[in-house]
Image: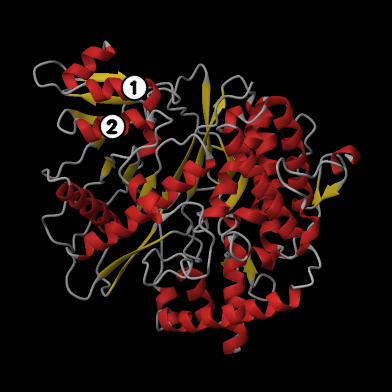
Amino acid sequence: MAEREQIKKTPGRTSGDEVADSPTASASGEKLKTEIDDLLDEIDEVLETNAEDFVKSYIQKGGQ
Amino acid sequence: MAVPKIVGIETELGVMVHGTDDWNPVSASSLVINAYVGRQAGRVNREMSLISWDFLGESPGADARMPGDFDFAYPPEVDTHLVNTVLTNGARYYVDHAHPEISTPECATALSAVLYDRAGELIAIDSMTAAQKLLPEGQEIVLYKDNSDRKGNAYGCHENYLLARETPFPDIVAAATTHFITRQIYTGSGKVGSELAGVGSTSVPYQITQRAEHFEEEVGLETTLKRPIVNTRDEPHADPARYRRLHVIVGDANPSQVATFLKVGVSSIVFAMLEDGALKDLPRVRNPVYSLQRVSHDLSLTHPLELDTGKSATSLEIQWDLYRRAIEWSEEYSFKSVGGDDAGSAVLARWHDVLVGLETDPMTLANQIDWIAKLRLIDGFRDRHDCDWDDPRLRLLDLQYHDLRPAKSLAQRVGLEKLVSDDDAMVAATEPPEDTRAYFRGRCLQKFPDEVVAANWDSIVFDLGDDPLRRIPMLEPTRGTKAHVGSILDQSATARELLDKLGA
C-alpha cells in the first residue's frame, strides 16, 4: 500500500493538498452564511404548507 | 479483458395527486405518460401513436403487473392500461408496478448518462405539465425523484452495466459489494430519520442514503422483497454468450448531476478494473447488509468496516484504495473501455476531489453531493426556526428536495453544480446518443414511426404492410451507432429501403 500513497495524483491535475487551511477560509465562511440565509428566505417562500399532513399523505407502495 | 462499459439508468418516480383523496397511483402514472406522448405527437404534427414495448425475450418477471381493479377517477379519454412506450431518444417510458419509470437509452460514457438522466427529468416535468390539462380544477399530479416514502416503502433507481460474460459471477459479487457499501458516501441522496423498526430520531436523526435500510440480503434475484445488495437478474439484453448486464438496485436517485456522474463513472471504472484483473486482492467487507446500513447512518464517515483480511477500514480508505488502483489500471490499460481518455480522466479527477472534500470538510461539497446539500439546508433551517429532529417541516424539506416541479424543487435551489446544460438535455429528450445502438432505435422511431410497430433493447419490429412483421436484432450494444448506420439511415427514404439495405 505504501507505494500507492505516492501516486494520489490525478493525471493533468495537482494534488488536493492545497485545499486545507486556506487563508480565505473565514471570508468564504461569511459568504456561505449569506448564501444559506438567502436560500432559507427562498425556501420559506416555496415550502409547502401544512407539513405534517403533506408528509403523512406521501405513501408509495409497489416499488422495486 | 474489459468490454465497453455501456450504461443505462432506470428511475422509478414517486407520484402524488394533490387536491383529491380519490386517486390511484397506476392511473396517475398512466396519465402522466400518456399525456407526454400525446403532447409529443402534437408537437411533431402526427396523430398520437404509442410505439409499444416489445416483451419478446424478456423474462416474465420483468413485467409484473399490478393485480386488482384500477379505479378510474380521470377523464375517460385517457387509457389506463399499463403504458409502455419507446421514445425517439431511445429511452423507455412506462408504468412499472405503481410508478412512472423512465429508462435512459444506452450510454457510452458517464457524462452521457448524466445528460440522459437530466433529459429524463425534463421529460417528467413536461409530463406533469401536459397531464395538468387533463385533470379537474384543483388537482395536480406531482412526481418526485426519490427512493422512499420514509414509511418503509422503497422504489428504485437502477443502474445497468455491460459486463463480460467470462468474468466469474462470484468475483463480480465480491468487488461490487465492497464498492457499493463504500460508494454511498458520495452517492447517497440523504434522508431524515430511519425506517428501521425501533430506531428513533435520537439515534439516527439523518442518514446518508435513502435505500440502504431497504436491503436484507447480500445476493439474490429479488427486487421488491428481501432486496439484495447484488442483484442476480441475468437478462443481458445483448448477446448472452459475450455479455452480462449487471442490474444494480442498491443506489439512490440523485438530483445532483455530480453524484450521478460519480455513481456511474466510478462504478464503470471499478467493473472495468475487475475485468482486467486489477481487483484481485481487494478486501471484502464482512457483514455486508449491516455494514451497508452502518455506513449510511455514519455522518462522521469514520465507521470502521471489518474486512476479511482481519483488518478494518473506513469507506473513505476503501474508496482511496480503489482510486489508487484506478490510476495504475488506467496507466496499463487506458480508459478505452469507459469511453476514452477524456471521459475516464474526468471521472478520476472528480472522484479525487470529492474524496479530498469528504476527508477534509464534507460541507465544501454542498454544491455537489446530495446528502450534504440536503443536510446543509436542514441544518440552516433548524438554526433559523429552532426546531428539533421530529419537526415535520424537516421531513417536508427532505421530500421537497426531490420534487421535480421547477417551482417547488429544493434541489434546484441549493446551487448544485451542473455538468450538462438544460439546452443540451432538452435536445437529448428527443435525440438519441450517437455512440450506442440507441442511435439506431431512436432514428428509426423518428424517421419511420408508422412502420415501427414495436421495439425493445435488443430488437426493432417493422410492419411494412404486406409482408410478415420483420424483426431487426440489435444484440451488440456498441453497434447501430451513427458511425455504423448513420449514412444508411440518411440514404433510406422508406423503411423498406432501410431494411433492404440492411439485408434484413
* Residue at image location 58% in from the left, 78% down from the top: A36
Identify residue type, mark 2.
Arg
Callout 1 secondary element: helix
Q: Tell whether B326 sits left or right of B422.
A: right
Q: Tell whether B194 sits left or right of B285.
A: left
Picture coordinates of residue A29 (x, y %)? 69, 77
Picture coordinates of residue B433 (x, y %)? 39, 36
Identify residue type, mark 1.
Val
Please tell me whether residue B248 is drawn above or below residue B380 in the rendered image.
above
Gap between marks 2 and 1 measured at Cα: 10 Å
Nearer to me, B243 or B493: B493
Pointer 2 or 1: first along the chain: 2
* Residue at image location 45% in from the left, 25% down from the top: B478
Pointers 2 and 1 in contact (C-beta within 8 Å): yes
The dot on residue B485 is 1
* Residue at image location 63% in from the left, 75% down from the top: B201
